[in-house]
Amino acid sequence: MTTLSVEQQIAVFRPAVGFAAHMHKWLLAGAALGIIAAAIFWHPVPLMIAVFLGVVGFSEQRAGPNIVSAIAAYDSGTPTNGEISIAITSWDTDNHYYATVREQGHPDWKFEFVPQGWQPASCSYPAQIWRVGSEEQPILAVMEQGILIPRHDPKQVGKEDRSSHA
């Protein structure tokens, strides 16, 4: 796997900005059409496709808007310096990547991400962090190795979790 630079990784997401915020709605609409087709033709194949599209549509409903927000923050926001700790869990043939964002003056946040154009390792890295919203949750983290965009909404790490990282 060739590693892309941070700018190349950001460029990969730029074309998706136009439709990413609403992609889950298109998937759910496709699921509804599949259900209708299964009922009309009384055949299980459209129903199986509908179930697949519905599951993906519901599970990824935050990914698209997070990509849009991350690119907007990168273009117009000012990052702050912090630290990212990456944890990797493996399921059969699939890895899941989790980042914990630590920054002076902010609570710790944890989120799942999908690396695009780089291969993370379980370690802590210095990072630039862009935040958004009233709770100032991280929407983008950039390290020398790559970018991290939350797949779902980040969750604030509880005090009991924070003390175990110290």
Image (cartoon, grey):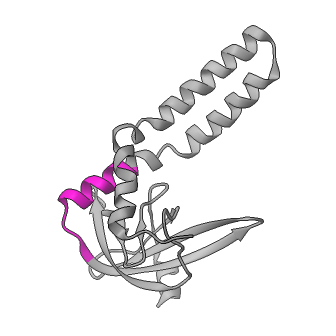
The one nearer the camera, 139 or 68, is 68
Residue 138 is situated, as x and y percent measured from the top left of the image, at 35, 65
Q: State the residue lying farthest toward the front.
A: 2
Taking the image as shown, residue 113 lies to the left or right of residue 106, namely right
Taking the image as shown, residue 117 lies to the left or right of residue 69, namely right
Query: Measuring 19% from the left and 61% from the top, which residue is drawn there?
Result: 77
Residue 91 is situated, as x and y percent measured from the top left of the image, at 73, 66
> Hey, which quadrant is residue 43 in on the image?
top right
Which region is colored magenta? 66-80
Q: State the residue lying farthest toward the right.
A: 43
The question of residue 72 being in magenta is answered with: yes
The one nearer the camera, 116 or 130, is 116
Query: Measuring 32% from the left and 80% from the top, which residue is drawn there?
Result: 82
Q: Is residue 122 visible?
A: yes
Q: Where 32 sits versus 69, above or below? A: above
Q: Where 44 sits versus 114, above or below? A: above
Q: How would you classify the magenta stretch by its main secondary structure?
A: helix
Residue 150 is situated, as x and y percent measured from the top left of the image, at 45, 60
The question of residue 82 being in magenta is answered with: no
Query: Measuring 53% from the left and 75% from the top, which residue is drawn there?
Result: 120
Q: Is residue 139 visible?
A: no
Taking the image as shown, residue 55 lies to the left or right of residue 165, namely right
Taking the image as shown, residue 44 lies to the left or right of residue 3, namely right
The quadrant of the rendering that contains the N terminus is bottom right
